[in-house]
Amino acid sequence: MSADAPSKPLIIPIFIPHAGCPHRCAFCDQAAITHVRSTLPDNAAIDAQVRNFRFAARPDRHPVQIAFYGGNFLGLSESTIHSLLTAAREHVRRGDVHSIRFSTRPDTIDDRRLALLSDFPVREVELGAQSMDDRVLALSNRGHTAETTRRAAAMLKARGYNVGIQMMVGLPGEDPEGAAASGRAVADLRPDFVRIYPTVVLRGSVLARRFREGRYPPLSLADGVGRTAALRLLFEGRGIPVIRTGLQASADLAPGAAIVAGPYHPAFGHLVLSKIFLDMMVDASGELIAASGELFFKAHPRRVNALRGMGNGNLRALESRPGVRSVRVGGDPALGPWDLTVSDRTGRTIFRRAVGSPGPGSSTGA
Ligand code: SF4
């Protein structure tokens, strides 16, 4: 059993930084995070990007998609939308790629714009919801409401598109309860997948000015990881895949380059998984600590790194607990992606499952 989604799609990003944006959202600086300075790619640039990605990728990646990211795709002029989709469709016709996806603002979804897509092999549309709290959206200069996102998702689903929702944690005015409420509201939209991004303070953004003026306190890394971990469990528990947690690492994103402050880490997604497993390990081990203090944790082999935590941090955290004498970890391919067992020297085993039905029982005596 795989601990992650079995399919390995190849997404070929075509960045259109800030193209089609009606204004600048408070947290955004696409030039900083995409390190693309020009606006719209021409056909030659799209061809080159497809060629380069196909050349570098394993041939079994499937599906292969061209993705227009970094801007507000359906906010572009109709002629530009048409010409970019035509260039992408040419690659579908040649068999280089299977379909097209793009990200767009919820307030660009209407009958007229959706009609523009009907001649093209668009499969996924990613809506930048960011939050489902109207106050947070206003403080983030988004210019739309949660209701706009609800309506947009419903229109896309009614037309058969796969819908992805991008949301953020740590936006201005958000607290942990608000983040959880936003997560539940996103889950209620029944998206096909979700991406969760921590809010970092990008150098050229409105948020950077507020931060310098003491008007925006960013989340700590621990709080960003904690809120994201809670959301990941919420979505996975509702059967909604979380395909990304955290920004794509790059040299440009290193603290001191584009990032002024905030919960950035190049392995943010790993920190999130590690936090989920540490919480389970602490919860599951109480009785065994009292009995012998010798703990042997197991998870699916692909989750063993999450058991260990960053730099073995989970192991150290457990070893420092009173009564713990030794901590070992190992893989068990029979376990599911969110399962954990902990045993002691007597063979007594306790089972935990973070997501889904309770499984074989919370405690199975040897
Ligand atoms: S968040 Fe989206 S809509 Fe807002 S400025 Fe950035 S790319 Fe444009």
Image (cartoon, rainbow, N blue to C red):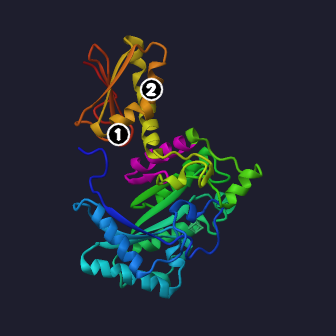
Q: Is residue 38 magenta?
A: no
The part of the chain drawn in magenta is 224-247
The residue closer to the viewer here, 83 or 56, is 56
Q: Which mark is residue 282?
A: 2
Relative horizontal placement of residue 201, taking residue 362 as reference (left or right): right
Residue at 51% across, 46% down? 228
The picture quadrant where one finds residue 51 is bottom left
- Mark positioned earlier in the residue sequence (1 or 2): 2
Q: Is residue 161 visible?
A: no
Residue 196 in the image, given as x and y percentages of width and height: 49, 53
Give the vertical position of 4 relative to 94 (above or below). Answer: above
Residue at 43% across, 32% down? 311
What is the crowding at mark 1: few (fewer than 14 residues within 10 Å), some, or many (at least 20)?
many
* Mark 2: amino acid: Val
Q: Callout 2: helix, strand or loop?
A: helix
Residue position marked by numbered label 1 in the rendering: 338
The residue closer to the viewer here, 100 or 138, is 100
Q: Disc count in the image?
A: 2
Which quadrant would the N terminus be assigned to in this image? top left
Give the vertical position of 12 relative to 43 (above or below). Answer: above
Which quadrant would the C terminus be assigned to in this image? top left
The picture quadrant where one finds residue 26 is bottom right
Give the vertical position of 223 relative to 124 (above or below). Answer: above
